[in-house]
């Protein structure tokens, strides 16, 4: 079993792996077209010639990258494939000189063992602005935000007044739903 950068011929296998977890809301759906457009973000785990896991590293800038679309198929579960995948994605983040890597998860214990620390979601506005608006669990989010490295002081949002306005509305909306 080994990790490698994904290539376009892997796109359908990646889509199938992600799709397994879309119905229950564990992962956000990714269309085949979206996967193809972002194939360079993906790493796959291959075992006996078959793609048995995948994950992506979304770069927001040198200040932040996000580990996303992480899934391991049943054949590779419990055999170290998750650790192999995260190690490969973290190596890519280091290669890109990223100072903070984040993720949103429902299994913080797994990522905690790898050195990730729990953080308030609001301290990762780039991530929230990118995905939270289209998430079916926007008003009932049960994911835990985690990070590794140095939390960014400056974000992409801090340089865009338009984005800050949308983010502020998102946070206000989420807070009013919680009341």
Image (tube, rainbow, N blue to C red):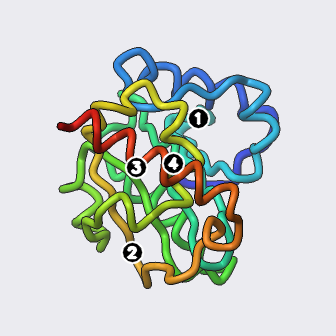
Q: Where is residue 49 in the image (x, y as percent from the top left)?
A: 62, 35
Mark 3 or mark 1, whichever is nearer to me = 3
Depth check, front residue: 134 or 76? 134
Q: Give the residue pinned by disc 2.
A: 148
Q: Do the residues labelled 3 and 2 touch (CB within 8 Å)?
A: no
Depicted 89 relative to depicted 148: above or below: above
The residue at the point 72 percent across, 34 percent down is: 35
Depth check, front residue: 178 or 45? 178
Look at the numbered disc 3 and give the secondary structure of its residue.
helix
Tag 3: Cα neighbours inside 10 Å, few (<14), some, or many (≥20)? Answer: some
Tag 4: Cα neighbours inside 10 Å, few (<14), some, or many (≥20)? Answer: many
- Of mark 1 and mark 4, the one earlier in the sequence is 1
The residue at the point 58 percent across, 48 percent down is: 166
- Of mark 4 and mark 3, the one earlier in the sequence is 4
Q: What's the distance in space between the residues labelled 3 and 1, CA to CA?
A: 38 Å
Tag 2: Cα neighbours inside 10 Å, few (<14), some, or many (≥20)? Answer: many
The residue at the point 38 percent across, 37 percent down is: 76
- Of mark 3 and mark 1, the one earlier in the sequence is 1
Query: Which quadrant is home to the C terminus?
Result: top left
Look at the numbered disc 4 and give the secondary structure of its residue.
strand
Q: What's the distance in space between the residues labelled 4 and 3, CA to CA?
A: 22 Å
Q: Give the residue pinned by disc 3.
A: 171
- Of mark 3 and mark 2, the one earlier in the sequence is 2
Depicted 146 relative to depicted 28: above or below: below
Look at the numbered disc 2 and give the secondary structure of its residue.
strand
Depicted 50 relative to depicted 158: above or below: above
Residue 68: mark in rendering? 4
Can residue 38 be seen here? The reply is yes
Q: Where is residue 139 in the image (x, y as percent from the top left)?
A: 33, 31
- In the picture, measured across the screen, residue 110 lies left or right of residue 57, that is left
Q: Give the residue pinned by disc 1.
A: 51
């Amino acid at each position: 079993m080994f990790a490698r950068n994904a290539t376009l011929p892997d796109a359908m296998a990646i889509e199938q792996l992600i799709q397994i977890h879309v119905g229950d809301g564990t992962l956000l759906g990714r269309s085949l077209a979206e996967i193809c457009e972002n194939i360079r973000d993906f790493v796959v785990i291959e075992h006996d010639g078959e793609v048995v896991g995948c994950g992506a590293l979304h770069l927001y800038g040198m200040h932040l990258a996000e580990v996303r679309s992480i899934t391991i198929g049943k054949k590779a579960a419990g055999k170290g494939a998750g650790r192999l995948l995260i190690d490969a994605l973290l190596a890519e983040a280091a290669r890109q000189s990223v100072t903070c890597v984040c993720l949103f998860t429902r299994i913080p214990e797994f990522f905690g063992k790898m050195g990730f620390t729990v953080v308030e979601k609001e301290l990762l506005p780039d991530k929230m602005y990118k995905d939270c608006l289209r998430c079916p669990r926007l008003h009932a989010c049960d994911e835990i935000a985690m990070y590794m490295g140095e939390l960014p002081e400056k974000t992409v949002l801090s340089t865009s007044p338009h984005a800050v306005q949308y983010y502020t509305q998102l946070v206000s909306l989420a807070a009013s739903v919680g009341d």
